[in-house]
Image: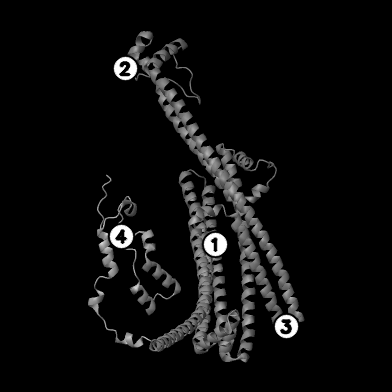
Amino acid sequence: KNANGVRKKLFRATAGLSLYEQSNLANSIANTGNNVLETIENMKIRSQKQKKSTKESTAKFQWLHDHMHLKKLEQAATKDVDAMILKMVNDIQTNSDATPDTNTYEASIQAAVEEIQAQRLKQLTIIQNDRENRVAMKRLLSNIQKEAAIQGPDWFSNVKVQLQRLMLDSIIGQHTLYEQLWNEASICEKGLQQACQSLCRDRSNISKSIGIPPEEVWKQLLASIIPERNEEDSQDDMLLDPIIKYNTLLEFESLQRHLNNDLAELESKYKETIEPLGCEYNGSIASKHPGWTDEDHERYLKIFKDCEPKGIRNDAFLTRLTPVLPNKSKKELGMHDKWYRTNKRYLQQTQERQAEYTRKYDQTFEKSKACITEAIETQKLKQSTQSEMARRTQMQAILHAKVEKFQLKRSVKAELIAHQNEIARLEAEAIQNAIETKRKKEYELKKKLLQDHKGWQELNDIAKEEALAKERQIEEELKLERDTINAERVLYRKKELEAKTELQKQHIQLEALEEQERIRALEALKLETPYAEKLSQIQMDPERTRQPTVAFQANVEAANEALPVHEAGLFPSHGYDTDKLFKDARFRLGIALQDAGLAKTEYAKHAMANITVRNAGSYRHSVQPKTQLW
């Protein structure tokens, strides 16, 4: 039956062939039918193997994609925790004079960070367990399918009920555990935010005593980020994590404290320097040195401006001052010079500290602005995720209520069927929602993921390899189809070649028989001619045939005779001429016999041998003498 089916397919494929060609093709297929069937079976087995390998590679690609996503989540969590810990350590080292409340806050923040890290690790563990549970379910289903073919339908029906219960308990149990963990995490997060808010209020009170307006700085930051924001609107504050606000204000407080410490240190040094000079420091720089008038100070400044660029100081400078200020002693001049230089240095250093503070303040402001903007976007995304999770939880509660309603109304069998359908729908809906959420997240985070191009490049390479594998698979399938068609063509052409070769052999044999018949007929005609006996008595005489003929001798003799100019021409002609050649009787007779098809007959040979040449001197077999015209 298989052979007949193959022959039918081949005849349909070769509908344009003649009956003779189709019969030859049918005979060749009948002889080699088993080989064709084996080839087709091998092709089917190979295609099944390729499909299996494609499925395995797709599963590997999905696993790699999930693994890379989890790895990135873990790296992001680790970076956040490390950055937070480093920041805490640096703040502790910088703010060595912090209050006991600040130390308590640092300890609470450290505990909160550890709690967040533990929660993230638990979440990653839950995701990994969920994946392992799915893999175990798939393996269990595959093993049950293999055993069902061996054990029989009764065993499969019993195992099927148990398997359905196991899957139902596993899925519902996972959702319940996930809801409990989510509620606990929400409660912990709310408690952490409340603690941070209270600590932020405490820190704001402490900052007021130092002289920093933290709320004004915070309002300026929010106003630069959101220009249309109202001062009474606290919605943006609710979007931010309180710890971000505290860290931001703490940075500005550290800058201010550092500036105050530098200014206080400069002020103490300045005070210690001017007290021996007879000046008292009352919180501001003295405009005059005691005992000096404005005219004396102007004379001093004139000499100072002239000598300072040239590097003239100390004794040399005082030597130049003495003629200008004769009423002042050298000691008084030295004390005034030291007082002026100290004031100038103090003002310059104070301005430098203020400029450095302004530069760092602007940098911190821009950095905090970017951090707050990113935090607001993250919090908005988190709120949308929470709303989506709440909606899914509500939908899940409704679906669970429907499942319970079905359990009360239906029998056990109908109940199991309803549960199966409901679970399948829930899984499909959950998968669809997860896919949609994932797509939105990837769209939102696409700009941020450009920094991590290397990791995605590996995934792109894997995807390209998968596409190339699919293309190779398609090419292999097309190649197998072409191989089958080419095998059929080869068989057909081989048969045609054999038939053609056989026809050629028959044609050659037929020509050989015709040639034998023609020779036999010629021999019979030869015996019927009147001079057949004479021809049979002729013997070969090479000596006679090698002698010069009468025509050749006549030409040689004629060549020795000098021809007139009107016959020889102006220039000597060596060999044959076209006009002379066509005047030759033997040449014209040969052309006529060849056109008539009698050139190879015995009569033609006899006529050509006995023709009389009357144009002696028409050939030249010797070189003519040179002309004497020049």
* Secondary structure of residue under mark 2: helix
What amino acid is at disc 3?
Ala
Mark 3 vs mark 1, CA separation in Å: 41 Å
Find residue 97 and report its horizontal and vertical position in percent.
Answer: 48, 43
- In this view, the residue in front, 390 or 273, is 390
Residue topped by disc 3: 414
607 left or right of 25 in image: left
Residue topped by disc 4: 575
What amino acid is at disc 1?
Arg
Say if 582 sits above or below 137 in the image.
above
Residue topped by disc 2: 315
Mark 2 vs mark 4, CA separation in Å: 133 Å
* Secondary structure of residue under mark 3: helix
* Secondary structure of residue under mark 4: loop
Mark 4 vs mark 3, CA separation in Å: 120 Å
Mark 2 vs mark 3, CA separation in Å: 113 Å
Q: Nearer the viewer, mark 4 or mark 3?
A: 4
Q: Earlier in the sequence, mark 1 or mark 2?
A: 1
Tell me the crowding category of disc 1: few under 14, some 14 to 19, or many 20 or more residues within 10 angstroms, Cα based.
some
Quarter of the figure with residue 349: top left
